[in-house]
Amino acid sequence: MPVEQAVGFLAASVAQRPAGAPVFARASGIWGGDARFGEMREVLAVLDRTAPAGAPVLVLPSAQLLYFLAGRPSPLPQAEMVLYLLTAGLLHPADARALAPEDDMLARLRAAPPVVVRADGDAWRRIAAAYPALASWIDDGYIPVARVGGHEILRPRA
């Protein structure tokens, strides 16, 4: 998108934002009137109630904006791009496993189990198919805290 067009889009978006519309603490310029905006705010609220501030959270499929808005790191930073490319259908599962071995990911997660935000849909199914032990570990070791739209927030079993 050309710069002039992008600036015009941004200006129109800001002008359309109703006075007093909710904003994100870490990105007050981000606003949207659709359901996804409200869902993202609710996911962040659940994370704030579920885990200490700044604690890592694993978002599957990868969602860089959610990590930023939550102010939380991924427990698997070296695997984030691999998971993104896998879920976008741009990386073959065998190549994903070669770049981000399942055993390595599980070792890191077992050492400090994070809260998990798992989205419904094809992207999660691609992760589960490529990393079946990871999917089983989450299914067996986590319990739901909340469901917000297509997102399920999970915490480790006590």
Image: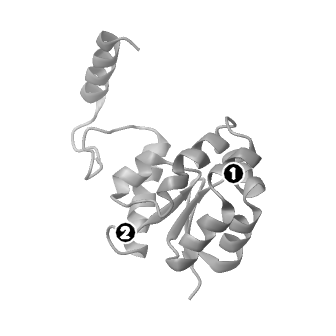
Label 2: few (<14), some or many (≥20) within 10 Å? some
Amino acid type, callout 1:
Ala
Q: Callout 2, which amino acid?
A: Asp
On the image, the x and y values in percent for residue 57 come to 46, 64
Identify whether 80 is placed above or below 132. Answer: above
Q: Is residue 135 left or right of residue 66?
A: right
Residue 145 shows in this picture: no
Image location of residue 134, percent across then percent down? 68, 66
Q: Quadrant of the N terminus?
A: top left
Measure how far apart labels 1 and 2 are at the Cα level.
34 Å
Q: Residue at x 62, y 70 (%)?
A: 106
The earlier-in-sequence mark between 1 and 2 is 2
- Mark 1 crowdedness (10 Å alpha carbons): few <14, some 14-19, many ≥20: few
Q: Is residue 13 above or below residue 118?
A: above
Q: Nearer the viewer, residue 75 or 55?
A: 75
Image quarter of the C terminus: bottom right
Q: Position of residue 124 (x, y in %)?
A: 68, 52
Which of the pair 37/101 is nearer the observer? 101
Q: Element type at marker 2?
A: helix
Locate residue 158 relative to residue 47 in the image: left or right.
right
Give the residue number, with chain letter if any, for mark 1.
Answer: 98
Q: Residue at x 25, y 22 (%)?
A: 11
Label 1: which secondary element: helix
- Residue found at the very far left of the displayed protein: 19
The numbered disc on residue 48 is 2
Q: Nearer the viewer, residue 60 or 120?
A: 60
Q: Position of residue 131 (x, y in %)?
A: 72, 59
Q: Quadrant of residue 142?
A: bottom right
Residue 99 vs 145, above or below: the answer is above
Residue at image location 52% in from the left, 76% down from the top: 113
Which residue is found at the position 74% from the left and 70% from the top? Answer: 136
